[in-house]
Image (tube, rainbow, N blue to C red):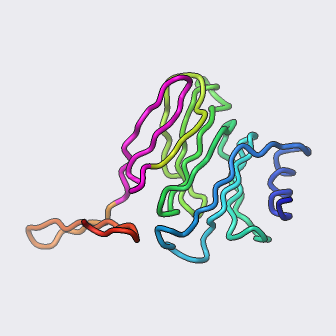
Amino acid sequence: PVGSGAEAAAAAGGGGGVRICALDWYDGTGGFEDPSLPTLAIAFENGRLQLMRGHDDAAPLLVDTGMTLTTAKWNPQGTVLAVAGANTSGAGSGTPYVQFYDSRGRHLRNLKLPGRGVRSLTWEGTGLRLAMAVDCFIFFANVRPPYKWAAMGGSIAGAAAASAGGGAG
């Protein structure tokens, strides 16, 4: 059984029996951006996300995605959570999307997809590409991480975090 935090998220969805559609625990292989941030993601079909610092987190982060969810997966660095499902409101109701959230539960971006539904997704080892199973097709997307940059005199300098396993290579 999952701790009281999961019960709180399920109850927030209105009634018992809310199904879990995905469970992903960042294993720490790529290092930790901040050890106090959530590493366990629980996705409920009703569109709720629960981001936890461990299995016994008494104060998890709760996020409402506004979608009917099918799957969720942390990137290899544990900094971005990709959540797939279908939009539940507006003119595009039923349209498949992948939403991206940071480890603090803040929404980063949406990726609209063709087809009827995303069944599965997985990150490439560097976290720069995502593969998604949509109906009977596989789609690939390049992910652009936020780069820090600065202008110094006549030059522009940029930086991006390297994964713990590699560096610039």
Q: What's the residue at 81%, 58% (across, down)?
A: 6
Q: Report the number of discs.
A: 0
Considering every residue shown, the one lying at the far right of the view is 16
Q: Residue furthest bottom?
A: 35
Asked if residue 150 lies left or right of residue 29, the reply is left
Residue 78, compared with residue 73, is above or below; it is below
Q: Which residue is located at x 63 percent, y 25 percent? A: 94
Quarter holding the C terminus? Answer: bottom left
Whether residue 136 is in magenta: the answer is yes
Compared across the picture, whether 50 is left or right of 31 comes to right
Which residue is nearer to you in this view: 25 or 80? 25
Q: Position of residue 15 (x, y in %)?
A: 91, 44
- Res 87 quadrant in image: top right
Q: Residue at x 63, y 32 (%)?
A: 86
Q: Which residues are magenta?
A: 124-146
At x 32%, y 61%, the residue is 147
Quarter of the figure with the N terminus: bottom right
Q: Position of residue 74 (x, y in %)?
A: 55, 55
Q: Position of residue 79 (x, y in %)?
A: 50, 62
Residue 141 spot, x, y in % from top left? 40, 39
Residue at the farthest left position: 154
Quarter assignment of residue 41? bottom right
**In this view, 86 is above or below 129:** above
Asked if residue 16 is among those painted magenta in the image, a careful observer would answer no
